[in-house]
Image (cartoon, grey):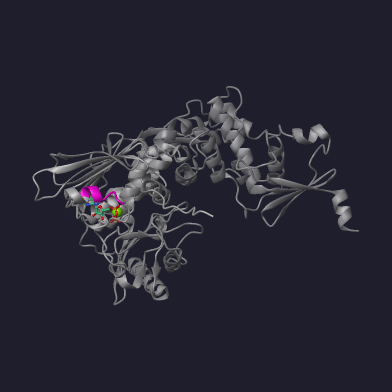
Amino acid sequence: MSDIIQLLPDHVANQIAAGEVVQRPASVVKELLENAIDAGAATIKLIVKDAGKTLIQVIDDGKGMSTTDARLSFERHATSKIRTADDLFQLHTKGFRGEALASIAAIAHVELKTKQDEDDVGNAIVIEGSNVVSQEVVVTPKGTSISVKNLFFNIPARRNFLKSNTVELRHIIDEFHRVALAHPNISFAMYNNGSETFNLPISNYRQRIVNIFGTKTNEKLVPVDEDTEVLKISGFVGKPEYAKKTRGEQYFFVNDRFIKSAYLNHAIASAFDGLLKNGTHPSYFLNLKVDPQTIDINIHPTKTEIKFDDEHTLYALLRSAVKHSLGQFNIAPVLDFDRDSNLDTPYNYIKKNTNSPTIEVDRSFNPFQEETQSKARAVAYKKEPVASWENLYVGLESKGTKTQQDFSEVHFESEESTGSMFSEDKQVDNIQTTYQLHNKYIVSTIKSGMLVIDQHRAHQRILYEDFLKNMTIKEAVSQQLLFPLQLHFSVQDIEIINQLKEDLEHTGFIFSGVSKESVQIIGVPVSVPESEVSIILEQLISDVENEVPDTHFSATDLLAKSMAKSLAIKTGQSLQKDEQEHLVNRLFACKEPNVSPTNRTTFVTMSVDELDKKFI
Ligand code: ADP
Ligand code: MG
């Protein structure tokens, strides 16, 4: 039989390798930024268009490449960073595999311009899908500029697999943050579709964090510093009261490389033990310096996990360092001499004029009117903590063109709903009795047997349909806030809020201003307690970041889901009898009572027959 094994041509091998190295535009960003850092750049600029789908360009003022190196840099396993296997354990650079440029050039149109300081002219190379299209001498400043255009042009499946621009941009910004946080001594700028997203001058670590995450961050940071023989820890943890519900800003850097470690994350969480509200996560920005010989980062090109020789010791040291800092911070205010006094006054406030709050007066208010009416009015104008059950559904059943005044009567009357599901097949005519089980399920008897409802999912379904209705008929009921609510977000979170602003307004939010780092809200949907607003928006932002698929994406739907998730009664919450009954009734008035907005079963039934069988 003849031989059948062949060596793959380079361009095929490169394309296969590219599948590993380049998963999305953000992977290219990471590789190019790391190369610029390895080249000793002092200033690095990142330019992206259409979330990197059209263009990713990184310009640095590093050491540049010679003519031969410029060409060689696109070969596979071509690297200037290691020479022998032993060098792997002495790594002081980000790169070492020599795979990135070869992989990127295999699946995109790449243009490289580079010049070394000592040369008069530089080189420009154009490569498309591993083919060198041109190489010529050009006048270009010292350093390197690489543009990557039309990523995945020759792998349509990959290109189609990319998520929406919002999501891809979010990944790019994440990579940018990781690199920029690890190198405050390098100046970074990022431009997206022609506008500047970040401009980070050389600064100390605290300022770098603040420049990225917003001026408000400054007051949240508690310094951590510990110098031991095996490990040097420096950086900051977020004060416990600022811990976030949905996602902390959590960054570990080991020898200036961003890593993820569930184990070390646990060390921090345990240092915060007893200080955090349930379900919240602390922020941290921690740099660990260890002997490169004691770690192994050689696992996978895109993986951020690394292996430590002595994880247990690191765990213990990290935990005690963070504990120590938190303790100090609790006892006495921390003096931080690095602190830049400019950071103390948030930017927005420096220029801010004082405005007196606008107060709405109800001119028709008559204190001598009948008891019931004035009570109802109080609910509509100023959100009193109404009986907890009313909170569940109040204001959601806006019908026709009700004004605020008659609206206030609506929520006391809502008995409109006995389910179509039941009336149709005549299973039951009415719900007779309900019990709450483990503060989680509502058990209800029906004619044919019994019904067990997941209270959290059921309520999500109810709220979801109501929000959707409000948003699509564009007729939400707002409650005006007595004092405007100022909420602070990072620049990229604001971008997401801006995208969803219109939909948010349809649910009843009223924005009086959106600035670079904050939003001002003067009205919220009636069903939303003021204290929940920031949690809802945070949850929404994280949902947008994590879940938006490219196609069929409806902001309205996502918003309705996200708000329903945030506001639905939780498992563990005990409900009064009438609350339970309302929940059951409202669920079966829904269009799709069987499943939650995320397609999970909301209730199960068990018939008497089935029960009988169990007793045989
Ligand atoms: P690695 O970074 O693993 O060495 P790459 O494919 O990313 O592999 O880069 C190949 C080589 O090209 C690098 O080793 C380096 O010598 C050179 N190179 C890449 N980018 C730059 C840059 N921005 N400035 C100078 N040299 C660079
Ligand atoms: Mg590299």
Rendering quarter of residue 301: bottom left
Outermost residue, right direction? 616
Q: Is residue 547 left or right of residue 332?
A: right
In the image, 287 versus 131, the foreground residue is 131
Q: Quadrant of the N terminus?
A: bottom right
How many labels sit on residues?
0
Q: Is residue 473 left or right of residue 455?
A: left
In the image, 446 versus 30, the foreground residue is 30
Task: Point out residue 3 in the picture as x, y percentages from the top left corner.
Answer: 49, 54
Does residue 497 appear anywhere in the picture?
A: yes
User: In the rendered structure, which segment of residues is drawn in magenta?
Assistant: 70-75
In the image, 419 versus 135, the foreground residue is 135
Task: Point out residue 181 in the picture as x, y percentages from the top left corner.
Answer: 29, 55
Q: Quadrant of the C terminus?
A: bottom right
| Image-quarter location of ligand 2 | bottom left
Task: Look at 86% across and 49% down and name the residue there.
Answer: 608
Task: Classify 418 as above or below 212.
Answer: above
Q: Is residue 413 left or right of residue 562?
A: right
Task: Look at 76% across and 35% down and name the residue there.
Answer: 421
Task: Point out residue 147 in the picture as x, y percentages from the top left corner.
Answer: 27, 40
Outermost residue, top direction? 401
Task: Look at 26% across and 52% down and name the residue there.
Answer: 35
279 magenta-colored: no
Task: Point out residue 307 in the picture as x, y percentages from the top left corner.
Answer: 40, 68
Outermost residue, front direction? 1
In the image, 26 versus 218, the foreground residue is 26
Task: Classify 263 as above or below 548.
Answer: below
Does residue 184 appear anywhere in the picture?
A: no
